[in-house]
């Protein structure tokens, strides 16, 4: 999961070296905290949150196989 979010975010931003993803896993869920450069925040969130919603949808579909809930937080 972590690698998937990292690849998607790095493709969107101007400063891919600033992309960091922290993964916290419990028995029923996975929390992914995405951090990007302040200048790139708008690119990751998108207009009306469309890009952020799309990232969450892709990750959620990928996590369906693991039978875990995935939460993507953009910090």
Image (cartoon, rainbow, N blue to C red):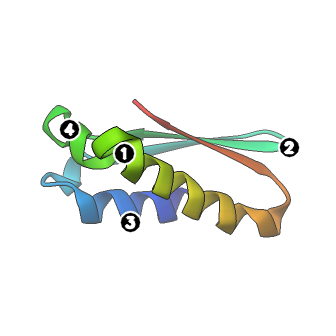
7 relative to 58 in the view: left or right:
left
Q: Can you tell which mark lies on residue 28?
A: 2
What residue sits 20% from the left and 54% below the top? 13
For the residues marked 1 and 4, what is the alpha-carbon distance in whole angstroms?
9 Å
The Cα atoms of the two marked residues, 1 and 3, are separated by 11 Å
On the image, which quarter does residue 28 sit in?
top right
Q: Residue at x 67, y 66 (%)?
A: 61
Residue for point 15% across, 51% down: 15
Instruction: Report the label total.
Output: 4
- Circle 4 packing at 10 Å, graded few (<14), some (14-19), many (20+), is some
Q: Name the image quarter holding the N terminus.
A: bottom right
Q: Position of residue 65 (x, y in %)?
A: 80, 70
Q: For mark 3, what is the residue? A: 7
Contact between labelled residues 2 and 1, with CB atoms less than 8 Å apart: no
> Which callout, 2 or 4, points at the residue further toward the start of the chain?
2
Residue for badge 1: 20
């Amino acid at each position: 999961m972590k690698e998937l979010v990292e690849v998607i975010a790095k493709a969107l931003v101007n400063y891919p070296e600033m992309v960091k993803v922290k993964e916290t896993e419990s028995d029923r869920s996975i929390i992914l905290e995405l951090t990007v450069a302040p200048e790139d925040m708008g690119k990751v969130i998108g207009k009306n949150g469309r890009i952020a919603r799309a990232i969450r949808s892709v990750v959620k579909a990928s996590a369906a196989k693991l039978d875990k809930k995935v939460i993507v937080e953009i910090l």
